[in-house]
Image (spheres, rainbow, N blue to C red):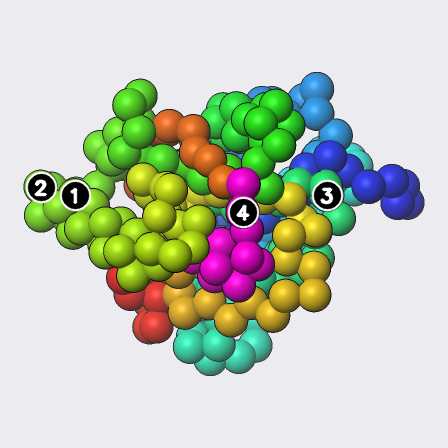
Amino acid sequence: MDVTQPLISIVIPTRHEASTIGVFLRTVYAHLAETDFELIVVDDSDRDNTVEVLLNLQREFGDDRLVVLHRASGSVAERTLGTAVVTGIHAARGTYVCVMDADGQHPPEAILRMLAMAQQSGAVYVGGSRYLPGGSPQGLDGVCRKGISLGLALLARLLFLLTPVRALTDPLSGFFLFRRELVQGVELEPIGWKISLEVLVRSNARCVTEVPYTFAARADGDSKARMGSDAP
């Protein structure tokens, strides 16, 4: 097995996404074809065959770039979006780590733009933003949900005014990239969907920036961000 450190690790939490995960991961592979990468999928499915689909994809891809971590035991409260992402971060080997969902709402084509921004600007954290010019929250259902999302983003900036969070338009984005060394030795204890805040605040990040992206409509599967303690 090649133990060379990849440039980037993509951490993807999944739950009950057997019908769509194949198309999604093939798309990620296609966009990263010229990049040294690894995909770390942390799967919490317990009532469909997502893990079997993932293992078949491992054989299809024929390399070691797809890592599947299946968490079959533990309560729903223990197997949250936050704990899944932290599990993936701990397993990551890349210089950079990108966290994204597998439901189609985070566009794979934006990964390389985020990576390029980090490399060119020297930023240790690059968030995907729905609220920068060129971005859009169109995948959020209805005006009310869009308003709540924007309001929570503004509240987070106010609550963490003395941290790098204040510089971000979308600090609660679930789509972000950071240098892995940023969290080495840092104990991450996120409550559900606040994983990006956890990385920003606990790591004491300084140089942070964003790139715009369009938040698309959800494809399929169970939203981990709506289960138990993950509810925003």
What type is the residue that disc 2 sits on? Val
Q: Circle 4 — which element?
A: loop
Q: Which residue is mark 1?
A: 146
**Percent coordinates x, y for residue 56 in the rendering:** 66, 44
| Magenta-drawn segment | 197-207
State the count of labels: 4
Q: Earlier in the sequence, mark 1 or mark 4?
A: 1
Q: Which quadrant: the C terminus?
A: bottom left
Residue 206 image label = 4
Q: Which residue is mark 3?
A: 94
What type is the residue that disc 3 sits on? Gly
Residue 176 image label = none
Q: Are marks 1 and 2 in contact (CB under 8 Å)?
A: yes
What type is the residue that disc 1 sits on? Lys
- Above or below for 73 versus 120: below
Q: Are marks 1 and 4 in contact (CB under 8 Å)?
A: no
What type is the residue that disc 4 sits on? Arg
Work out how far the residue at label 3 is from the one at label 1, CA to CA, in angstroms. 34 Å
